[in-house]
Image: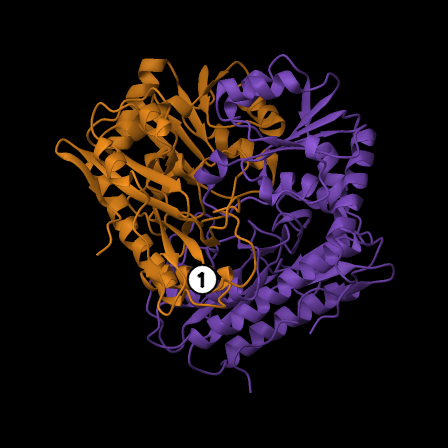
Chain colours: A purple, B orange
Amino acid sequence: MTTPVCTLDLARMRRARTDKLRTAMAAAGIDTLVLCNQSNVSYATGARVPASDHVRASWWRAVAVVDRTDPSPHLYTEFPEGSASDLPNDHLHPAVEVESAQGAAELVASLPGGQLGLDDAPFPLWQALRARDVVDANRALAPAKLTKTIDELECIRQAQAINERAIRAARTAAQSGALATDLSGAFLRAIAELGATSNTVDPVFQVMPRSVAVGPASVTGEPVFPLPTRPHKLADGDVLWVDTGINLNGYASDFGATWIVGGEPDHHARTQFGEWRATVDRVLEATKPGATGADLVRVATERTGRRPWLSYFYLAHGIGTDSAEMPLIGTDRGDEFDASIVLQPGMVVVFEPVLWDDGNCGHRSEEVVAITEDGYLWLSNRAELDGAT
Amino acid sequence: MTTPELDYCLTEMQRRGIDALILGREANARAVSGADRLWLSGTRPFATGCVVVRKTAAVHLLANSNDGFEQFPIERCFPLTWSPAKLLGELRAIPGLADAATVGVDGMSPAMHELLGELVPRADFNDAGPIFAGMWRVPSADKVQAVADAARVACNGLAAMAAFLRDGVRARVLRGVCAERFAALGVTTPAFEAVAAPIDGGASSWLAPERLIGAGEHVALRAGALRHGWEASLARTYVVDEPSVAQPPPDGWSDLVALCQAGTRVGHLRDLDAVVYGLGRGVEPYDDDLALEAGMVLALELHRGRRLHQDVLHVTDNGPLILTADD
């Protein structure tokens, strides 16, 4: 079990986020932020909307307008009951239909002058802002989100704990003859009962091939992952790669594991896990403030000279209001980008190397830590070798 | 590879003088490509997830595999990348895209605008929304069947929730029961996460309070499934008991349903307190002045007093058919 970071105080968390965001806006020279992305609106306001598919979510889109000189954000939402209790009444507005030209024009007419920062817009809103000078809201959002307060860390830890607890129900269901979608059902039921705010991704329980050549067809020549879960019947010996994410109070979690259906891990599975464990352990030894992304990549690759992860992913990614956010370490953006990432206290890092041994399948798991003043603390439990006795 | 939806899209691009589309919304990408990519909850940032080039009549997809939609040519998949430079390279390699003078998009962000400025420096950007709004209006037996299939899943999920609706249950338990039932029918993606909401005057019927539900309470249940990218949903009201008792629709419901036929203005239904919107690859918003036509599939909802009711209707030449009818 992980240890609580603090006694969770959501009001304190919102205040701290607002302060960070306004400081970052000042540094970026942004006077007003216009935010349309659900996770950004949640970050800026604490607002909740019903969890839904993207089309419905766009239709229900809440919008936040953050003025640097105003201690409270403005929230436009169809769901006032989902707004934070400390949002002043005069900052809570009916929904504005930024998917339509009329709604977009209304919102733009209400914006103050000065430098605007925008995250992501339906096209009618983008058109309505044509006459304004607009910069990327990430200039303020990214630095604000990069490090987490103790309450944010505790949210992520609790989200991860629910995810890991619910995954036990799916593991129990992972038997020969079961359908992969049965595991999804067991997981989704469990996260709801355990108090998750919502599910964030179609839970992945993917039967992996022994070798890439067996298929599915791969554009990169590497294993293809993750794929949507389909009603595929499981059989003894199947190797499942698992990837699940849930949301709690606006914060994501990320669970990854490798399961073997109906049997103990064979020699290959043990070797692969051993390599995975050794890779992450070496990286963890180097995980402390001041270390760069390039340092971690070097440690992860120095023994074999190869990058033990998928080229289209990473050695590690951050997590917060999005399930994958900065810092991104070991991506295909290259060494210079990795070198520019300097670990700081409050950053959260999800390690997810992949050990692929073509012909003998492979191993992936995930572990989540937060950077502290002198090292790191665990936000997930340690990965285990499934089925080992 | 061609489909009626892609044909419609290419015809509209021609008519509107749009050379290429860059699509971030999964429903739009799925409509023109058949792509079945991993489902994520909530709004998604605009991205170059799918490209349609009119000159070549080709669709290109950001995907590492065509697994599950093998009819889509894998040579038109381009891989995931975190590098803007590599992404630009992949997009430049799409025949005909870099020459596009008019590009339709379904969203925009400052970062993507900068990237697209390098890709198609002289292009005008147009709203791709009207092309898809039009596509959703094209009558299609396949669409009706797909929504009806999703409706069967939604009805099953709601029935499972009703069976668990007892004194002392929590809304979140019912939410989980619904998701589990969907999965038992092979559907792991919702249109929205199921809701069990006490109707106690003013409380939300979408974001339910996390309290115990008590005997004798009127409770609205909502279930919505997204099956193969097609959406259907329903809502029913129960009084909590052992077992809980389904309530008839509110007064005026059958009149509203009867009005759902060709020629009725959507605004007229709304004047009668109905919530009305189209359904298909998600929600399809309707204007007040839209007149219903045979072939349309819509959600109709009425909340009066302590009863909330929602169904999915198929408007036909012979009147409305309820796709979420109770068995």
The residue nearer to you, when weighing B67 against A36, is A36
Q: What percent of the width, then of the height, locates residue A25?
A: 78, 31
Farthest left residue in view: B318
Look at 74% across and 46% down and name the residue there.
A14
The answer to whether residue A112 is above or below residue B137 is: above
Look at 56% across and 78% down and name the residue there.
A270
Kindly identify which residue carries mark 1: B174
The answer to whether residue A149 is above or below residue B276 is: below
> Within the image, what quadrant is residue B50 found in?
top left
> Within the image, what quadrant is residue A374 found in?
bottom right
The residue nearer to you, when weighing A279 against B204, is B204
The answer to whether residue B241 is above or below residue B137 is: below
Q: Secondary structure at mark 1?
A: helix
Q: Do we see residue B183 in this rendering? A: no
Q: What percent of the width, then of the height, locates residue A349?
A: 70, 56
The answer to whether residue B278 is above or below residue B152 is: above
Look at 73% across and 32% down and name the residue there.
A139
